[in-house]
Amino acid sequence: MDALISAADSALRTLFARPRASRPCPTVPEAPDAPLSAEDRAMSGALMRVNHVGEVCAQALYAGQSLAARQAAHPDLPLARHLDEAGREETDHLAWTRQRLDELGARPSWLNPLWYAGAFGLGWVAGRVGRAVSLGFVVETERQVEAHLASHLDRLPAADQASRAIVAQMKDDEARHAREAERAGATAMPAPVRGLMRAAAKVMTTVAHRV
C-alpha cells in the first residue's frame, strides 16, 4: 500500500505541481543574450515542449519500475532505490524544461496525463519481468533519449543559448544514467523491443511538438 501511495504521489507531483530542481539551471558562461525572432522562439518552444514531455515520461517510467521492484515476490529494494535516485535527478530536467517553456512563452503538452499513464505502464511491465530486464529498459531508454537530445542540439536556433545549455546537460546526464544501469547488471533489449520503443517515441515526439 505504501508503494502505491508513493506512486500516486509521484504522478500528482509530476503532472500538477511546480517541479523544483536540486541543481541550478545550466547556463552558458558569458554567452551573448541575443534576442530570438518570433520564428526561433516558436521553434525553441516546440522542441522544449517535446523535451518536457520526455521528462514527464522519465518520471513515469522510473516510478513504474520502482513500484514493480517493490511489489515483487522478493522485493528488490536496492533496485528500487537506484530507480528512485535516477528519478530524482530527472526531476531537475523536468524543472529546467518547464522553466524554459515559461521563459519562451510556450506551454506544456496538453496530453501529459496520457503520456504519463502510458510510460508508467511500460515501466511497470518492464519491472515485473525482472531486475536485468528492468535495467536493460533503462539503458535503451536513456540511449534513445540521448540520441534524441543530440538531434535537438542540431535543430535549436543558434541564438537560443539558454535552451542549448539545458539540453546539453540533460544529454550528459542521460548518458551517465545508461552507464550506471549497465554497471548494475542490465541485459540488452532484443532488436524488436528496441524498434517498438523507437516507434512509440516517434509518435510521442511528433504529437507533442504541436499538442
Image: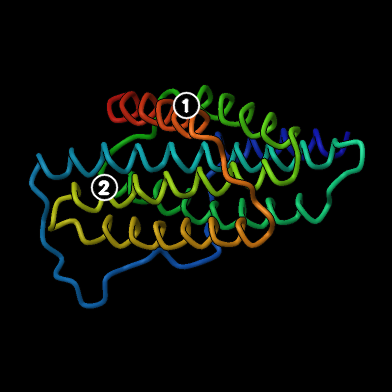
Q: Position of residue 137 (x, y in %)?
A: 59, 41
Q: How is the image coloured?
A: rainbow
Q: Amino acid at mark 2?
A: His
The answer, for residue 106, to whether it is visible in the render is yes
Which residue sits at x=32%, y=43%? 48
Q: Position of residue 69 (x, y in %)?
A: 79, 42
Q: Amino acid at mark 1?
A: Leu
Checking the image for residue 34, the label placed there is none
The answer, for residue 20, to whether it is visible in the render is no
Give the left or right position of residue 20, taking residue 65 as reference. left
Badge 2: residue crowd in 10 Å (few <14, some 14–19, many ≥20): many
Give the left or right position of residue 183, taking residue 148 as reference. right
Q: Secondary structure at mark 2?
A: helix
The one of 49 and 192 positioned closer to us in this rendering: 192
Q: Earlier in the sequence, mark 2 or mark 1?
A: 2
**Quadrant position of residue 159:** bottom left
Checking the image for residue 152, the label placed there is 2
Furthest residue to the right? 74
Give the left or right position of residue 208, taking residue 80 as reference. left
Q: Secondary structure at mark 1?
A: helix
Checking the image for residue 196, the label placed there is 1
Q: Position of residue 4 (x, y in %)?
A: 80, 33
Which residue sits at x=19%, y=49%? 156
The one of 30 and 125 positioned closer to us in this rendering: 125
Badge 1: residue crowd in 10 Å (few <14, some 14–19, many ≥20): few
